[in-house]
Amino acid sequence: MSATFNPFQTAQRQLDEAAEVLGISPALHAFLREPMQEVTFTIPLQMDDGSHEVFKGFRIQYNTARGPAKGGIRFHSDETIDTVRALAAWMTWKTSLVDIPLGGGKGGVICDPRSLTPAEMQRLSRGYMRKIAHIIGPEKDVPAPDVYTNPQIMAWMMDEYEVITGRHLPGVITGKPVDLCGSQGRCDATARGGMVTVRETAKVLDMDLRGAPVAIQGYGNAGQYAHQLGGELLGLQTVAISDSRGAIYNPNGIDYDAAVAWKRETGSVVNYPDADALSSAELLELPVTILFPAALEGVITGENAPRVRAKIVAELANGPTTPEADHILYENGAFVIPDFLCNAGGVTVSYFEQVQNAYNFYWPLEEVHDLLNATMTRAFYEVHEMAQARQVHNRLAAYLVAVKRVAEAVVLRGWIR
Ligand code: NAD
């Protein structure tokens, strides 16, 4: 991400383009451009050595017209309020696009999780929950994992919330471990949903994806499962992967089990024995069929977009492509599966988790997979048909579908015309 890239300004510019095409009123447009509520706070933390440090945290409820806010919590040293605002806006459009009865939110803490011990991480997670407990809940705002947060952290946060409220309310947070009120199929839901959109893309482009070379930027939850499921479900061949420390490339393919084991043992994909070293920037420009950005925002820009050679850019990450890059990719004939379509499988199964928590009745894995498949397929074709009908790029088409629904809910509630 470049130092000058502002994700929230990007999110607002994307909305502006859609608002103009939809012809929504200036007042409604102004309302949709800003979060409805945001809180900023400090979390004092006792470190293991007895010293104290202070961390800054955020929770933003961007829009709740269609239902309770929904969105992950990111622990990252580069976290800013504008990153959280952008992610909360994109969640609003995402829940609308897949047509689940939720709004959009997001949260985060400025911290370097890799420098914290597990005990410090637990105290930070509980401290974060104590600061937001009064504004969240199953009927108000439901957090989930995002970059550098995971099911264990969700379990600690759920427990803290239940201690504070004195009630069993697992639906306060999603992405929990399956053994503690989580849902089957949540762990790989983001990548699995992304594979549905890639599968349907291949159908509309009349492409055979078996053996197609793939590059994956980011090798965490979204990236690792993309590697595994891309091979298992679609026969893709992953030839390049990267994480925050660098990238690796083997045109003959990188073995999933070996790469994951290497990352687990060494902490990174770099120095993996059966591949050549590459820079993270070079990975984006490889001659692959599919590029999966699965790390952070603002990595495909007006500067490098002319050199992106992938035929399909499947955005598992949120906000990887700037508006300048969008137009270049479109003109160059790349098929972009926009973030809040491609990665919507995560929030879709989070919603299933909430429903199961509310009923205290848990579904088998097949049911989760079937409903996820149906939801993602429907959303894909709504976007595709909009793009065809309006002759616009897929991101604008996704915005047109999603913003219209949120705008209608705002008007129906009588908040604004
Ligand atoms: P994660 O913490 O599990 O993994 C993040 C990965 O990105 C790590 O491997 C990290 O090393 C890598 N990374 C960080 N900076 C990088 C850089 N400059 N170059 C290359 N790699 C880099 O996070 P995640 O949950 O996989 O999330 C990744 C993206 O997917 C984020 O944009 C997130 O918002 C989005 N997303 C995740 C989910 C989900 O369910 N996990 C759902 C929707 C969207």
Image (cartoon, rainbow, N blue to C red):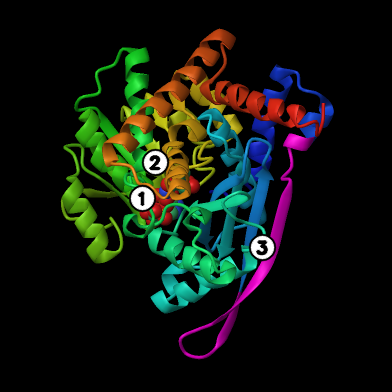
Magenta segment range?
A: 31-54
* Disc assigned to residue 388: none
Q: Which residue is labeled 1 in the image?
A: 221
Task: First in sequence, mark 1 or 3: give its number.
Answer: 3
Report the residue marked by disc 3: 134
Residue 212 can be seen in this image: yes
Could you tell me which secondary element the residue under label 2 belongs to? helix
The type of residue carrying mark 2 is Thr
The reply to whether discs 3 and 2 touch (Cβ–Cβ < 8 Å) is no
Q: Residue furthest bottom?
A: 50
Q: Residue at x 64, y 26 (%)?
A: 405
Q: Is residue 41 magenta?
A: yes
- Give the position of the C terminus as an image quadrant: top right
Q: Residue furthest top?
A: 389
Q: Give how far across and how far down residue 154 sits, in percent.
A: 45, 60
Decide if ligand 1 comes within 8 Å of the CB at mark 2.
yes
Q: Disc 2 marks which residue?
A: 190
